[in-house]
Amino acid sequence: MAKVTGPLMSIDASGAFADTMVYAKWKGINYSRQYAIPGNPRTANQLQIRDYFTTAVAAWQAEDQTTKDAWNQAASGKPLSGFNLYVGEYVSYRIANAGAVPPSPFLPS
């Protein structure tokens, strides 16, 4: 990934250019990369993990504020939010326990 100064003869640029290059900004630094269409093989495993993420988000939304506060506290000092930590742990729990849904409330360990 190349750092870009003055992309496309301008101060700033973002978006795709002729489906060959993509210009964007990350943490205040302009960059460009080759345009890519991501693969989506839709394997059974991929669909299952996506389902785990979907149910993790729904479970977070159903948790009470006390549980959310516990996850936010557990995530403090880390480069992620309580929501991110919750979803990651929720998905990891399901993978480790043959798809079993964690108990509610699901609290940080």
Image (cartoon, helix red, strand yellow):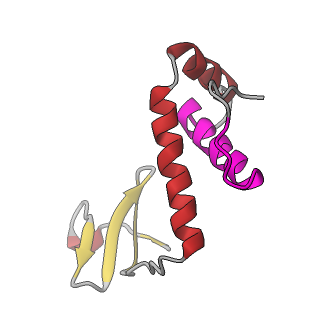
For the stretch drawn in magenta, the main secondary structure is: helix
Asked if residue 33 is positioned above or below residue 69 in the image, the reply reads below
Residue drawn 67% across and 37% down? Answer: 102
Asked if residue 106 is positioned above or below residue 48 in the image, the reply reads above
Residue drawn 57% across and 13% down? Answer: 66
Q: Nearer the viewer, residue 72 or 50?
A: 50
Image coordinates of residue 106 in percent, x first then y, are: 65, 29
Res 78 → quadrant: top right
Q: Quadrant of the C terminus?
A: top right
Image coordinates of residue 18 in percent, x first then y, are: 21, 84
What residue range appears in magenta? 80-102
Q: Nearer the viewer, residue 89 or 20?
A: 89
Asked if residue 88 is positioned above or below residue 77 in the image, the reply reads below
Image coordinates of residue 87 in percent, x first then y, are: 58, 42
Residue extending farthest top: 66
Image coordinates of residue 36 in percent, x first then y, are: 39, 81
Asked if residue 45 is positioned above or below residue 102 in the image, the reply reads below
- Specify whether 58 is left or right of 100: left
- Whether the magenta-drawn stretch holds residue 81 is answered as yes
The number of discs equals 0
- Whether the magenta-drawn stretch holds residue 82 is answered as yes
- Specify whether 44 is left or right of 106: left
Residue drawn 45% across and 30% down? Answer: 61
- Specify whether 46 is left or right of 28: right
Residue drawn 32% across and 69% down? Answer: 23
Res 13 → quadrant: bottom left
Q: Nearer the viewer, residue 99 or 56?
A: 99
